[in-house]
Image (tube, grey):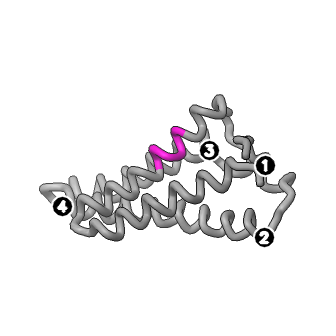
Amino acid sequence: MRIVRPGPVSGRTWTPVSAVNGGLAFALELGLLAALCYWGARTGGSTAVRVLLAVGAPAAAAIVWGLFLAAGGPKFPLPLAAEILLKLVVLGTGALALYTTGHPLLGLAFGGLALLSVVVEYTAF
């Protein structure tokens, strides 16, 4: 088993495992945005702060993802280790958001699936 950088989506060789993982990864990305929006709506003290967090947290995650982690090829490529770490950190914020809003099992499940997806994505079978 070796760690590899997956190429842009259009240039990848798709296997059944990578296709299923691609679907899981996309669902995790959407779940991340939803979890951060939910966290923001539940966290702020005033309505204005809740709205700002509910919009700003997912927007910040989407910007980071688009700049450094986009499947079609990031605008600013990172070294492999940094890319993997950043992906785990960003997806981990979704798990943490769910955990801190009173959904610990959902947060743990999200975190576990995120870890599994990243391992499968960067491991050559």
Which one is in front in this view, the residue at disc 1 or the one at disc 4? 1
Q: Which mark is residue 16?
A: 2
Q: Say what amino acid the circle numbered 3 marks.
A: Leu
Residue 48 location in percent, x, y? 21, 56
Q: Tell me which label, 1 or 4, sits earlier in the chain.
A: 1
What residue is disc 4 on?
47
Q: Secondary structure at mark 4?
A: helix
Magenta-highlighted residues? 85-90
Q: CA distance from mark 4 to mark 2?
A: 45 Å
Quick one: which residue is furthest to the top in this view? 79
Badge 3 density bin: few <14, some 14–19, many ≥20, Cα 10 Å: many
What residue is at 26 percent from the left and 63 percent from the top? 41
Residue 20 location in percent, x, y? 69, 70
Q: Say what amino acid the circle numbered 4 marks.
A: Thr
What residue is disc 1 on?
8
63 or 113: nearer the viewer: 113
Q: Secondary structure at mark 3?
A: loop
Q: Quadrant of residue 89?
A: top left
Which one is in front in this view, the residue at disc 4 or the one at disc 2? 2
